[in-house]
Image (cartoon, rainbow, N blue to C red):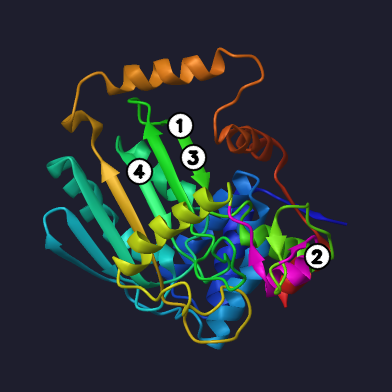
């Protein structure tokens, strides 16, 4: 029978598993919070289902559990973090105050993270900036999984970006979180573990042909969202989160799944804007924009499903199947 856990229990279980696998208290706390947030929003692929991968990577050395991030600020609006081949989450936390203070002082500031790792649900970092009254534009790149249009060899990752907009009241008015691919690669990995087929249009096999086999997709490439437009978004993220951050390229980063290769050494780029530095009335204009979207029947805002999931999870908790629980406890 599946076990029902509260969000507090999800976080506690995650923390204990990460500590047992070799993470420091600081790293375990940061990553466990991200797992709790993913489960809260119904994003199972980034929640407890990903925890065994985190644990495997701690044990094989793909992520260094005791890494101590190094933060420098070479210019007033530029924050640079070296994650030291540890988890992305504590590295992001380490540079957070410098980023937000610089944005509030200068109107805009950027933080890059190098020698990093999978940062979980990217939109959560953008929303955290919005809750501080800032517009958050966050990007992260990943090991190569998308081939250029007309090609078959992946050169960029799913390379998502997230945008979160403050509501002027300490909350989030609007949140967008999307990858350059039709779907996040973690969704394909999850279906491969379950032996489930993929919908058409998600992926290509190693020969560059469309496939509905999750196993073949993992050997091939992901389809870019919107064709060449999605590939262009992925290139933008590669420029900012990889090249500008001084991280490994998507082509040279080791996979986020499995023990092969050393630390992936990927990167992130977070840009924080203080809307009050540019014009008055920002919150009112955003409220009018949102009202215009929702005034039409059948419409919804990006992120609305996540917000609905939060209420449901708070009431019902999280169901964890026996197989996953057994993997975590052993």
Give neighbour class at mark 2: few <14, some 14-19, many 20+ (Cα, 10 Å).
Answer: many
Circle 2 or circle 4, nearest the eye: 2
Give neighbour class at mark 1: few <14, some 14-19, many 20+ (Cα, 10 Å).
Answer: many
| CA separation in Å, label 1 and label 3 | 7 Å
Contact between marks 2 and 3 (CB within 8 A): the answer is no
Which mark, residue 174?
Answer: 1
SS of the residue under disc 4: strand
Give the residue number, with chain letter if any, for mark 4.
Answer: 136
Residue 283: in magenta span: no
Q: Position of residue 330 (x, y in %)?
A: 72, 78
Q: Position of residue 232 (x, y in %)?
A: 45, 54
Contact between marks 1 and 3 (CB within 8 A): the answer is yes
Give neighbour class at mark 3: few <14, some 14-19, many 20+ (Cα, 10 Å).
Answer: some
Give neighbour class at mark 4: few <14, some 14-19, many 20+ (Cα, 10 Å).
Answer: many
Circle 2 or circle 3, nearest the eye: 2
Contact between marks 4 and 1 (CB within 8 A): the answer is no
Give the residue number, with chain letter if any, for mark 2.
Answer: 213
Which image quadrant is residue 268 in?
bottom left
**Label located before the other in sequence (1 or 2):** 1
**Label located before the other in sequence (3 or 4):** 4
Task: Looking at the picture, tell me which residue is in the foreground, 235 or 190.
Answer: 235
Q: Position of residue 170 (x, y in %)?
A: 35, 31
**Label located before the other in sequence (2 or 3):** 3
Residue interval drawn in magenta? 209-224
Which mark, residue 176?
Answer: 3
Contact between marks 2 and 4 (CB within 8 A): the answer is no
Q: Position of residue 179 (x, y in %)?
A: 53, 52
Q: Residue at x 32, y 22 (%)?
A: 283
Q: Considering only vertical position in the picture, is 325 above or below 231?
A: below
**Label located before the other in sequence (2 or 4):** 4
């Amino acid at each position: 029978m599946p076990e029902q856990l509260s969000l507090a229990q999800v976080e506690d279980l995650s923390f204990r598993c990460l500590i047992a696998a070799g993470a420091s208290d600081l790293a375990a706390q940061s990553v466990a919070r991200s797992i709790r947030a993913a489960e809260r929003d119904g994003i199972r692929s980034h929640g407890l289902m990903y925890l065994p991968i985190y644990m495997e990577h701690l044990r094989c050395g793909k992520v260094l559990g005791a890494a101590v991030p190094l933060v420098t600020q070479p210019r007033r609006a530029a924050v640079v973090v070296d994650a030291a081949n540890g988890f992305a989450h504590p590295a992001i936390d380490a540079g957070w105050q410098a980023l937000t203070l610089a944005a509030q002082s200068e109107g805009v500031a950027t933080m890059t993270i190098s020698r990093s790792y999978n940062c979980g649900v990217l939109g959560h970092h953008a929303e955290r900036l919005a809750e501080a009254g800032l517009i958050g534009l966050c990007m992260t790149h990943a090991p190569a999984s998308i081939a250029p249009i007309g090609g078959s060899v992946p050169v960029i990752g799913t390379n998502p970006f997230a945008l979160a907009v403050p509501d002027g009241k300490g909350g989030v008015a609007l949140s967008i979180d999307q990858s350059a691919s039709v779907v996040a690669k973690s969704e394909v990995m999850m279906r491969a573990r379950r032996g489930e087929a993929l919908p058409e249009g998600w992926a290509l096999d190693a020969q560059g042909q469309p496939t509905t086999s999750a196993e073949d997709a993992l050997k091939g490439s992901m389809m870019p969202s919107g064709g060449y437009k999605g590939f262009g978004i992925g290139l933008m993220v590669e420029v900012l989160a990889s090249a500008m951050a001084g991280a490994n390229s998507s082509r040279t980063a080791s996979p986020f799944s499995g023990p092969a290769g050393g630390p992936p050494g990927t990167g992130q780029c977070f840009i924080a804007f203080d809307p009050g530095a540019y014009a008055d009335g920002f919150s009112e204009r955003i409220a009018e924009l949102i009202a215009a979207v929702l005034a039409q029947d059948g419409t919804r805002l990006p992120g609305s499903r996540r917000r609905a999931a939060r209420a449901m999870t708070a009431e019902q908790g999280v169901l964890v199947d026996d197989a996953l629980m057994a993997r975590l406890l052993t």
